[in-house]
Image (spheres, rainbow, N blue to C red):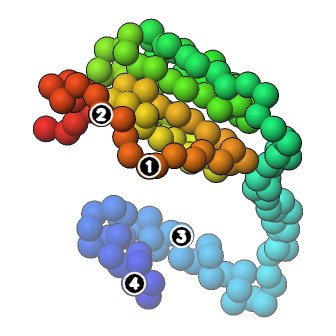
Amino acid sequence: MSNPLKKTMVYLGLADEEEVYDEEPAEQQPAARGTAKPVEKAAPVTPIHRPAVVRQPAPSAVSEILTVHPKQYRDAQLIAENFREGIPVIINLSQMSDADARRLVDFASGLSLGLYGRIERVTSKVFLLSPENIAVSGDGTVAQADPEVTPFSQP
């Protein structure tokens, strides 16, 4: 038992001493005689390449802006499909529950980040998703909503 790993396995009770003695001579015999087993060739490995980011060409002018009034979280599919096409999307969350609205804002944030766009809060329940090729100008301040209604504040 010259192998420290096998000694440790026997000590921890993961292997019996008899099993270790039976295995060692079988492994060492071909090497001692000088006849090596034929080495099996490993299967060729094909590396996986990640596809390059496909960016759509910038259109010359914005031809439409989609306004969505989602009522359920599953309406996120409509938002994603249009945003991927390069269409700016205005999301009005006033008809959703607070929990679903938070989920949808999280989804929209990930969508805009993944497609190199931006998400901006217009009011407390209205958000603008703008694609990468659309510039949004303004004074940068959020429109003042009712101060008593703070649906997305963290406790």
Mark 2 closeness class: few <14, some 14–19, many ≥20 residues within 10 Å? few
Q: Residue furthest front?
A: 139
Tell me, for residue 4, which label it has, or none.
4
Q: Are marks 3 and 2 in contact (CB under 8 Å)?
A: no
Q: Are marks 4 and 1 in contact (CB under 8 Å)?
A: no
**Nearer to us: label 3 or label 1:** 1
At label 3, the amino acid type is Glu
Q: Position of residue 131 (x, y in %)?
A: 66, 42
Whether residue 100 is situated above or below residue 22 in the rendered picture: above
Which badge, 3 or 2, comes first in the chain's sequence? 3
Residue under numbered circle 2: 144
Residue under numbered circle 1: 140
Secondary structure beneath dot 4 equals helix
Real-space CA distance between mark 3 and mark 1, rounded to the nearest whole angstrom: 74 Å
Residue under numbered circle 3: 23
Residue at 57%, 77% in the rendered image: 25
Real-space CA distance between mark 2 and mark 1, rounded to the nearest whole angstrom: 12 Å
Tell me the quadrant of the picture where the C terminus can be found.
Answer: top left
Q: How many marks?
A: 4
109 on left or right of 63: left
Q: Are marks 2 and 4 in contact (CB under 8 Å)?
A: no
Whether residue 64 is situated above or below residue 86 in the rendered picture: above
Q: Are marks 3 and 4 in contact (CB under 8 Å)?
A: no
Residue at 42%, 37% in the rendered image: 121
Q: Position of residue 13 (x, y in %)?
A: 28, 63
Which badge, 3 or 1, comes first in the chain's sequence? 3
Residue at 45%, 84% in the rendered image: 3
Which badge, 3 or 4, comes first in the chain's sequence? 4
At label 4, the amino acid type is Pro
The quarter holding residue 2 reads: bottom left
Q: Depth check: give the residue in front, 65 or 100.
A: 65
